[in-house]
Image (spheres, coloured by chain):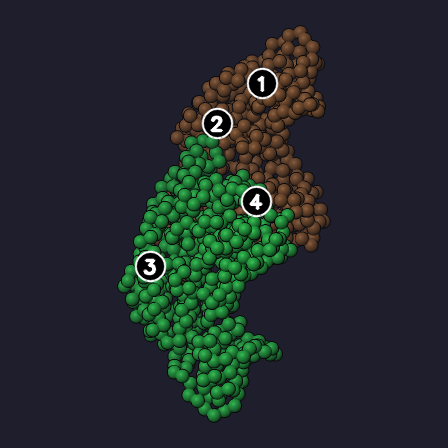
Chain colours: A green, B brown
Amino acid sequence: MPYFDAASAAPLHPVARQALLAALDEGWADPARLHREGRRARLLLDAAREAAAEAVGCRPDELTFTSSGTRAVHSGISGALAGRRRVGRRLVVSAVEHSSVLHAAADHEDRGGTVARVPVERTGAVDAQTFGRALTEDTALACLQSASHEVGTEQPVAEAAGLCRAAGVPLLVDAAQSLAWGPATEGWSLLAGSAHKWGGPAGVGLLAVRKGVRFAPQGPADERESGRAPGFENLPAIVAAAASLRAVRAEADAEAVRLRALVDRIRARVPALVPDVEVVGDPVRRLPHLVTFSCLYVDGETLLGELDRAGFSVSSGSSCTSSTLTPSHVLKAMGVLSEGNVRVSLPRGTTDEDVDRFLEVLPGLVAGVREKLDAPAAAPSPAPDDSLVVDALGKRCPVPVIELAKVIGGVPVGATVTVLSDDEAARLDIPAWCAMREQEYVGEEPADRGAAYVVRRLS
Amino acid sequence: MPYFDAASAAPLHPVARQALLAALDEGWADPARLHREGRRARLLLDAAREAAAEAVGCRPDELTFTSSGTRAVHSGISGALAGRRRVGRRLVVSAVEHSSVLHAAADHEDRGGTVARVPVERTGAVDAQTFGRALTEDTALACLQSASHEVGTEQPVAEAAGLCRAAGVPLLVDAAQSLAWGPATEGWSLLAGSAHKWGGPAGVGLLAVRKGVRFAPQGPADERESGRAPGFENLPAIVAAAASLRAVRAEADAEAVRLRALVDRIRARVPALVPDVEVVGDPVRRLPHLVTFSCLYVDGETLLGELDRAGFSVSSGSSCTSSTLTPSHVLKAMGVLSEGNVRVSLPRGTTDEDVDRFLEVLPGLVAGVREKLDAPAAAPSPAPDDSLVVDALGKRCPVPVIELAKVIGGVPVGATVTVLSDDEAARLDIPAWCAMREQEYVGEEPADRGAAYVVRRLS
């Protein structure tokens, strides 16, 4: 049963399991104690820190273990902002950062700080120069991910780091998705990672802070982990995290080549096999194991359910698959289609056969979902009529787009279709559909309920 | 090799190990995902929450899993204070709370709040009426531990909870040391616990918040754990924590009787076997497995080292065994001797033989340490002389007390010995020595360096 959601959580690496078991026996005691059990725990903790620091590319005393990647990000951002409070209270982030970064940014705003969110290109990458221009004199911190957890696009971290250095602004790199593949690009001031993304256990994050970076941990004081991660160390899991990072790295180069070829196969074959698909993210500057595509006229949750029944576990940035009912902020920032969105992230060991079988079942499943939704299968047939208004109020993604597609053939070229919709995803998906179909997206007009999206038929 | 430091971290319960192993295979995926691995993880998480809630004595939707007991305390205090911000900014805590509570209180002060620290009696217990009187109209939250992690004394939680209810003040109970033995006394509004204290794995804390208690989580938002514990759930460890809490509870009553008898043996025998020992904490209203005593004229770190070499792992609240060089705030608040302090906390399964062997080796080890320090073995011999000044500047605990004891016999009854000391522990230990030796502690006078402690010879 192929599991294609490594970007959410990678299956536990065998070395992580082994190390965890050993450390349960040797490393359960308090490493702050002086007795032999405590000293043994301390030795394990020190060794894990050395191993992890080597893999990260920093000194052991620059690295602390946190309880999750999210905590590493939260503590890293709040500590760096507080350390540079005198410089200013501006935080610069890319618009496609992980929710932990964006939530920390929103919290900073709630406390009176300001946040600049740098937009991205259609590939999901920021333009380094645009990022650099956001680094004003009062900028306390900038955050840029190494690569997108959602579409796999790599960010221009080296260039951004150079501009940050020139501006005297520390750069926090969220390397959660890329640490399995290698150390982060040089130039970061703070770095965050998460063990369960590389096949380590849950409960372990990494926060590295370069010597010389001003850092003032926030919240109640605590003696553990240099005061940067309060609470009893999760030692067996830390040992397993460090051991598995080493193990994963030893296989990383070969595995990256293999998985990159499999992802290339998906990127090439899906649009050929499935009509009306948009593969998103940078095709070249990307993580080796991750690809995302969106299927027009498809309900993401239904498609995920069908794939699940067929044995494939994938993830989605469609609004209907998240608890917030808004589409992924990443797809939104990229301006790409969000409906029928599928993220495939291959764990180590994924076989050619797994991917081939996925490509075999996908077209039928997408067609089935479209049929159930009564989506237009071919180009709509023309009919003489004037401009039209479609009432899709109360209908969820992808229904508004399907309704639009069904009627646009019924208006003459040059006339418009106005879709009334109160579904947040429509704001993103109707313009995206227009781009895919080469119709003109005229714009959005206010309406009593929701909004009115105006589309002009061009062909 | 008997490990007598269960109060720092209990050895992993076999059920915790088993459950952890099983959950590593079944529960590594993201419980927020819709695919089968995610749903399986969600089922495990829900089951663990139900089991833990039953053991805690609350509803599953009142319970969240945090990454440590410390985090549970920090989040519980900050969330409850923020939830009642309009009522006032006063926080009431006992003076002997765990450092995580006191650090959260200090953080609250740093942010402009006020903190009342309720003193304790010589047993380590607060007087419930004194605690109640601290609950003013602008009190947002009160915190009282179920039992002391350091001396084992149980607090009058039921009485305190009644007074809190009458005053309309929510009560946070830190039940970290007592959850292994049973649910916390009724009446709490918030409750914190820590799995590695009951034989569960590291990396798991509990925060329970009763329905109806105003609570506003602080820090960046996060969808997991009702917004009260950000970051990917440490699921295998959570499963192990819940399973081991159940298992520990099934054995708790029988084990409590057995360990209570062993602790009673230590409480009775240590003062009989070792001269100049003060056994501290309430002899009856106490945790079953924990006893603390202090040995006059003994250096805590040296004694811990000797015990460690003899095979016994214990802990200490003496200043020389902590990284801060100040004696335990708990012993300080109780006003008892802190030098040569030993905390014995027995894990489940401790045998009679383990304890007997401890009682066998302890007297010789204490005598050895005293001999090395040239401590007075018997009552000091009198000599005709006037009042004396002893310069113990630059000398660490227990040297100042030893110097005092060596010379006091040399001054006539009614005359004084003034000890100059810049060791923080002397402030606590010289008065405690006076109480033990029935000499008069006159008081402390300012000095160029450190302080001058004046003692009058009475006998």
Q: Residues within 10 Å of mark 1 (few under 14, many from 20)?
A: many
Q: Which residue is drawn at 42% across and 25% down?
A: B310
Identity of the residue drawn at 60% across and 22% down: B394
Q: Mark 1 points at which residue?
A: B402
In the image, residue B391 above or below residue A169 = above
**Secondary structure type for disc 2:** helix
Q: Name the residue under label 3.
A: A259
Foreground: disc 2 or disc 4: 4
Tag 2 subunit: B
Kind of element beneath mark 3: helix
- The answer for how far apart the CA atoms under marks 4 and 1 are is 45 Å
Query: Could you tell me how far apart the alpha carbons at marks 2 and 3 are, in whole angstroms?
Result: 54 Å
Q: Do labels 4 and 1 share a chain?
A: no
The subunit carrying tag 1 is B
Q: Distance between the residues labelled 3 and 1?
A: 71 Å
The residue wearing badge 2 is B304
The spot of residue B418 in percent (x, y) is: 67, 18
